[in-house]
Image: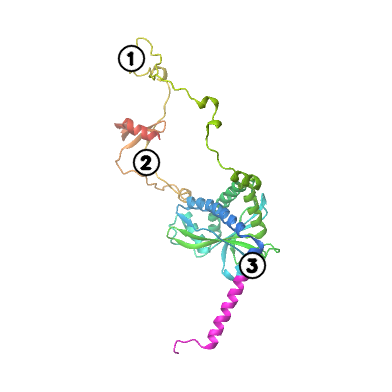
Amino acid sequence: MNGMLSQEEINALLKENDEQNDTSTANDGLAADLLSTMEIDVLGEFATISMGNSITTLSALIGKKINISTPQVQVTTIASLQEKYPQSCFMLKVQYKKGLAGTNVLILQPHDVGVIVDLMMGGDGSKPPEELSELHFSAVSETMNQMIGASATSTAQIINTQIEISSPEYRIVTLDEPGLFDENTEDVVSILYQLNIEGLVESEILQILPVATAKMIVDEVIQHNVPAIPTEEIEKSNAVKPQSRSKKMLPKEEETPAIRNVEIAPAKFQDFTPVGTVKNEPPNLDLIMDIGLQLSVELGRTHKKIKDILELTNGSIIELDKLAGEPVDILVNGKLLAHGEVVVIDENFGVRVTGIISPEERVRSLR
């Protein structure tokens, strides 16, 4: 081999390039026929807000920072998606019941869902399960429900219409599975997001909508978010130039304003201090001396995941955030007042006050 291509290889490459160009041209024509450029832009803005709320919810649930890219909106076909994504994937599917019509499908990689499951179950995301069991699906179901709920809420706010969706359906599928999409649906809109989960995941999320549902969303967004101003009024307002503030436009009083010298003095108020009292004297506390207050002593605190709480049994040890021998907190009505040490008096526990917190610390504890 001398490193040069034969004529047969060159012809094969040229033929492959022509086929790709033909496919690209066909897809461009499909997009132009079904959705205009303006409609695709509106759909992209809508997807950014809707998916952004879902990802924010997911980030709060798993305790990791998540970033998604600007969505890539494309009109395509189910057959093209099946060729592009032949492997198994995690599908989340909901049906619009009110406000919109059609389906909304999210496609994620099983590995990415495994990382989310591992984080939810107390792991660090570095050891996702190789296969998702029923237990894993139960753990991730609540997360997905809240994501879809956040998306539906933002959608309702954008289009100013009440949205109702069916219970989410999620499972491992391949895109060529029968019944995955409506039988009459062939042309769809794919919305692709690049997904990053804080050093754990570098992947993508695919959202699939029927073209009819996408058009319905675009129409609702335009109807409820673009001011309905007649074109004639816009042209008329643009044609009228702002007039200068002349003397004729001013009220009669403003034509020759009177200039007066005004004497300014500080305001004086009547002194309501009772006769015979001193202003700096503390208020009379006798009126509230018999009010009961709750005094409690806090040994320490800790944070546990729901999984850890459910695993507690008799004999379990809970580690607190304070060291042995460290002063305990004395609280009055739940507010920090003093520090002390635990003592034993006869057969009862007690607390010896070792320090009262300063007024500044009291103020900070009230925030």
Quadrant position of the C terminus in the picture:
top left
Kindly identify the amino acid type of the residue bearing the numbered disc 3: Gly
Name the element at disc 3.
Answer: helix
In this picture, which residue range is highlighted in magenta?
1-28
Name the element at disc 2.
Answer: loop
Label 1 with label 2: CB-CB less than 8 Å: no
Residue 17 magenta: yes
* Identity of the residue furthest to the top in this view: 275
Kindly identify the amino acid type of the residue bearing the numbered disc 2: Gly
Kindly identify the amino acid type of the residue bearing the numbered disc 1: Val
Gap between marks 1 and 2, in whole Å?
44 Å
Label ID, residue 300 = 2
Q: Which residue is mark 1?
A: 278
* Identity of the residue furthest to the bottom in this view: 1
Left or right: 279 in relation to 67: left
Q: Is residue 259 above or below residue 125?
A: above
The nearer-to-camera label among 1 and 2 is 1
